[in-house]
Each structure stands twice: as structure tokens, then as C-alpha cells.
Amino acid sequence: MIAYNRVGKTALQVPRLSFGSAPLAHPSFVKKVSREAALNTVRYAVAQGLNFIDSAPHYGFGQSESLVGEALKGTPRERYILATKVGRLVEPGVRSYFDYSRDGILRTIDESLHRLQVDRLDILHIHDPEDHFREALDNAYPILADLKRQRALHAIGAGMMQWPMLRDLALNADFDCFLLAGRYTLLDQGALDFLTFCQERQISVLLGAIYNGGILATGAIPGALYDYFPPSPEIVERVNRIEAICLRYGVPMRIAALRFVAAHPAVTSVIVGLQTTLEVDEILKAWQTPVPAALWDDLRAAGLIHAAAPVPAIEVENGSEQ
């Protein structure tokens, strides 16, 4: 069974492992799945306890939200938790574009509710505001804060692939959570101080892109991507060193990557993008797979994980470290 954590200082509880819906329809994912397979994956994941679903209008230009909404149509609303994002409007199936105007934010919320076939959302993130800092604070945040005051929303967040602006947002407004993509992984612990910052302020961290775009799941094979681009020789060399230590202990690197990020106490939930029911089974098995303490010791001794980065405790209960 997957344990639950509270989101920030809110009453909302989410499972520590959650379902990322981007791969169901996002054009950046090469492997495609049929509509029926995607619907089955969402339903199966929720039935297996992965009932916190992260989506966004940008993912598949509306298609990801539409698939989630269709899959969960008829499922009691209290059985699943939804997070989506504001800041991008979409032409369905064609493109998305930034719109941080008040009208744009209100419109994207209405459109997400329609695609998801629900009358309320649990978490709304301000999506990729790198070039829209003031608009995010002056336009988007007040709308989300008003929805939260009306109890039409549980938690306010922001999501992006860098942490300095997330910290700046936290210093200027009252956020409950942040979705940080790719900046705290087995390969990159650059956000370690930021996680401490969030922990001190009771801001939940939801981690996405824990495989850095794929390379931590596949290894540095031909065609592997790092943050969705071809990796540099330095990244390839580092990945190979990490994988060699993992293999020394018979642990697939993708499992070590998952278990590592989940060990940080600031991490409320780990979001993993899933496409098939088989991938759901695989991630649940990985979540329960113990990793020898010596593996973490060797990675630390080799300078491959930060000296201050938490690792799973050695105590084992029900087959997994606590």
C-alpha cells in the first residue's frame, strides 16, 4: 500500500507515488499508445492506488486532460485527486501558447474542468512562468488564491524545470506546493538547498522528470535523452558510472533513481509518467524493491550523489525501506 502525505499546510492528502499523464498524449514522447490503452492505463492506475493524477493543458494540447476525464467518467470524485496547470491556452490537438492574462487564466481553468469532466480541481499549478514572473504573481496567483478561499481548490502550486524562480515565488506569495521537474534526481541534486527551503516553510515538493528525460531509466544507450536533448559526454560518463555501481548490486538504475528521490523528507509525492498497465505494475514493484545501503555508500564515496542528500533508511518493512 502506498502511504499518503499532506500537501503543505492544507488538509489535502496525496499518495507518495503519483501518476503523470503527460506520456499519454504529449508529442515529445516518441512511443504512442492507443486511446483505449491510455484509458485503461488511467483506470488501472487509480484502481492500484495511484489516484493522484498530474496533467496540464499543454500535454498533448488538451488530449491528456481529455483522456483522463474520459477514463474517470463515472468514478466517484472522492476516489481520485487531480492537479493541472494554468498559464497556457490550447488549440485542441494542435498547439499551446502562453497566456497569463486574467481572462486567459480563467479561460484555461474552465477548459480544463470541461476536458477533465469535473466541477472542481484539487491542485492548480502556475505552469512554466520563466518569462512571466510578474504576470504569474499579479494575475494568476490572485485567481488561484480566490478559488482556494472559496474552497473550490485545495492547493496552489507552480511547476517548472528550475528552482530559483520557484523560491522567488515562495518569497512573494503563499504557495502550498511546487512541482519541480528534473532538478532533484539521482543525476542532478542541484536543488538540494531549495528542498530544505521548502521543508522549512512547509511547502510540499512534487517531483517530476525523475529520470531526467529518460536517460536514468534506459541508461546512456544510443538515442537516450537528457532533459529531452542529446546528453553531453560528461552526462553520459556520469550516467555510466552510476549504472555500473547499481549493476554491481543487481539493482536496475531506474529503481535506484526512484527510491533515491523518494527518500528526501521534503518530497511529498513522486510523479512518474506512465503509458501502459505494464508500466504501472513495474513502477509499483520498483517502489517496493529494497536497495542495499552499500549501493548508496558507494555512490556517495564516488562523488555521484551529494554528501547531504538523504538516502532510504536501512530498516525494511513490508519489503521496502522506510
Image (cartoon, rainbow, N blue to C red):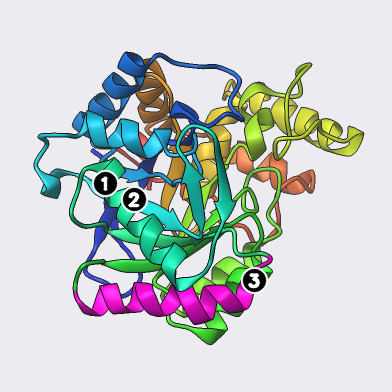
Residue 150: percent from left, percent from top: 20, 76
**Residue at image x 39%, y 71%?**
176
Magenta stretch contains residue 105: no
Dot 2: what SS? helix
**Which residue is outermost to the right?**
233
Q: Is residue 102 left or right of residue 192?
A: left
Residue 151: percent from left, percent from top: 19, 72
**What residue did someone put label 3 on?**
165
| Main secondary structure type of the part rendered in magenta | helix
- For the N terminus, the image quarter is top left
Badge 2 or badge 3: first in the primary sequence: 2
Q: What kind of residue is marked 2?
A: Glu
**What residue did someone put label 2 on?**
111
**Residue at image x 21%, y 69%?**
11
Among the 4 quarters of the image, the one containing residue 73: top left
Badge 1 or badge 3: first in the primary sequence: 1
Q: How far, Cα to Cα, is label 2 from label 3?
A: 27 Å
Magenta stretch contains residue 134: yes
Q: Is residue 192 left or right of residue 148?
A: right
Q: What kind of residue is marked 3?
A: Met
Residue 114's label in the rendered image is 1
Dot 3: what SS? helix
Residue 299: percent from left, percent from top: 70, 42
The span shown in magenta is 131-150
Q: Is residue 149 left or right of residue 271?
A: left
Dot 1: what SS? helix
Q: Is residue 27 left or right of residue 41?
A: right
Task: Sort mark 3 into few (<14), some (14-19) or many (20+) by Cα contacts within 10 Å.
Answer: some
